[in-house]
Image (cartoon, rainbow, N blue to C red):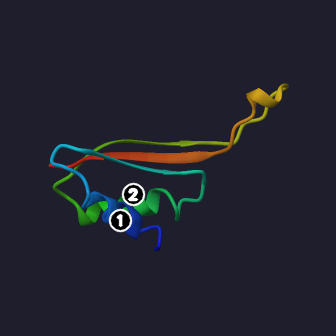
Amino acid sequence: MAPRQVPAHDAELLRPQGRLIYSTCSIDPQENEQVATHFSEAHADWRFITSETTLPQAGPLPTDWRDGGYFAVWQKP
């Protein structure tokens, strides 16, 4: 299944007022913002709540390291 299809497929399973969270462990705009934009345009009646991209981060301890990622949240009408 192509990334653009994932949110739309899962959206069908939600109850009214349910929240859809699309999340990746990527910082690639094609997998993140472009998928979110496509979903928002195709589901104009859904309420967009928020999105965020986190960048990879290193630190002095292994526990301070993190991968980059992205998430977006919508609410079904």
Q: Quadrant of residue 39?
A: bottom left
Numbered disc 1: secondary structure: helix
Report the amino acid beneath label 2: Ala
Q: Is residue 15 left or right of residue 36?
A: left
Residue placed furthest toward the bottom: 1
- At a point 60% along the width and 51% down the height, the residue shown is 25
Q: Foreground residue, 13 or 40? A: 13
- Give x and y (percent) for residue 21: 38, 47
Q: Is residue 22 left or right of residue 18?
A: right
Report the amino acid beneath label 1: His
Which residue in the protein does label 1 denote? 38
Real-space CA distance between mark 1 and mark 2, rounded to the nearest whole angstrom: 5 Å
- Give x and y (percent) for residue 23: 48, 50
- Give x and y (percent) for residue 8: 31, 64
- Give x and y (percent) for residue 74: 29, 47
Residue 36, which numbered label? 2
